[in-house]
Amino acid sequence: PRVVFSGIQPTGIPHLGNYLGALSNWVKLQKTAAPEDELLFSIVGWHALTLPQDPKTLSDSRMDMLATLLAIGIDPKRSILFHQDQNQNHTELAWILSCLAPMGKLQRMTTWKAKLAASRNANDESEVDESLLNVGLFTYPILQAADIMVYKATHIPVGEDQKQHLELAKNLADTFNRAYKAGVFPSPHLVTTPCCRILSLKDPTSKMSKSAPDTASRVLLTDTFSAISLKIKASVTDSLGPITYDPILRPGTSNLLTILAACVDEDVHSVAGRYEGKGHEALKGDVAEAIEKMIEGPRLEFERIRGERGYLEEVARDGALRARERSEETMREVRATVGLP
Ligand code: AQP
């Protein structure tokens, strides 16, 4: 049987990129899983702390994320849906793994290198904010490995951008097994998502992101049709004439085609073919409508569930209990293996 694990940070309401690139695949996996497969989906609050967070906002986002995951169709009876920060076994295993993880490997993580380069590129020494280069940001791939390994997860559905982190998890599983001459951890596999990297609506050279300052750069799963229409109409495209799909020369236009193709579940080239000789206005109108059609159901469900505080708390409590129980089996084995039973 497979053990599927994936996580999302409670850093705001999920956007179209999170949904098309990850969350919709979670729901699909839940539908297609064999009865004996186990599924675990986690809201990873500790990861969110690697960047500065306002406590009240984080606490609200954490609940909203739970409501969103229920609204898109994660079934808390079928899957273990839980807050990472309610299961201390993750941090305990992360510590044990960090005592096996070579510094050099972490220094080569592209996410870390990008943060380091950004801080070094600051023109003025006084612009370098050292607190942003915190130890947590450096070691969070180890916590990610622990998130996976503490359930002995075998299948990890995440975006391509997470490939290097998953390699680290594989490596740590292998290192642990060899160091202690014990076959405790299976090797986790990346389950690539059928879709796509969605780009920012305002800067199509970067990905759509929850924490980008410009709120017009992303469509949230909770946006109304009028908000969606406004954001899509105002999205950055080009003036290169009729619509064609060309991600290099026309990243903004191509991003809209990618979104449309993903919403209607068709190949992007055949979607692009329908816009031969047409302009951006027609495309943008259709994109907004296709998004609305896809997210209207989840949005209404989110609005309903969000008010049900008692139910949300019950789901969180039950998820945490099951996650703790499930990971405790692994931790008993790990503690005994390392000599700290
Ligand atoms: N633009 C994107 N296109 C496709 N997939 C995406 N994902 C994120 N952005 C896009 C996928 O969403 C999952 C959950 O992401 P996360 O919240 O754990 O962290 P992230 O990748 O850093 O996402 P954000 O939205 O950019 O959040 P912030 O701004 O808080 O860092 C992952 O599987 C990711 O691949």
Image (cartoon, helix red, strand yellow):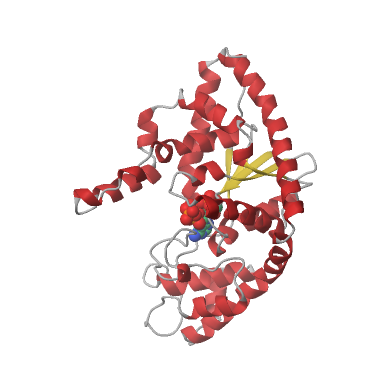
Q: Is residue 159 visible?
A: no
The one nearer the camera, 232 or 154, is 232
Vertical order, 30 against 269 (above or below): above
Vertical order, 160 against 217 (above or below): above
The one nearer the camera, 204 or 265, is 204
Q: How many marks?
A: 0
Which residue appears farthest toward the front when viewing the image? 56
The one nearer the camera, 248 or 136, is 136
Residue at 64% x, 31% y is: 152
Which residue appears farthest toward the left when viewing the image? 124
Residue at 43% x, 72% y is: 252
Q: Position of residue 158 (x, y in %)?
A: 56, 48
**Left or right of residue 2, residue 278 in this image:** left
Residue at 70% x, 43% y is: 39
Using the rendered view, name the quadrant where residue 302 is placed. Answer: bottom right
Vertical order, 189 against 57 (above or below): above
**Left or right of residue 43, residue 203 in this image:** left
Q: Is residue 321 visible?
A: yes
Quarter of the picture holding the C terminus: top right
Vertical order, 37 against 228 (above or below): above
Q: Position of residue 282 (x, y in %)?
A: 53, 86
Q: Position of residue 144 (x, y in %)?
A: 53, 38
Using the rendered view, name the quadrant where residue 234 is placed. Answer: bottom left
Quarter of the picture holding the N terminus: top right
**Left or right of residue 55, residue 183 in this image:** right
Q: Position of residue 146 (x, y in %)?
A: 55, 33
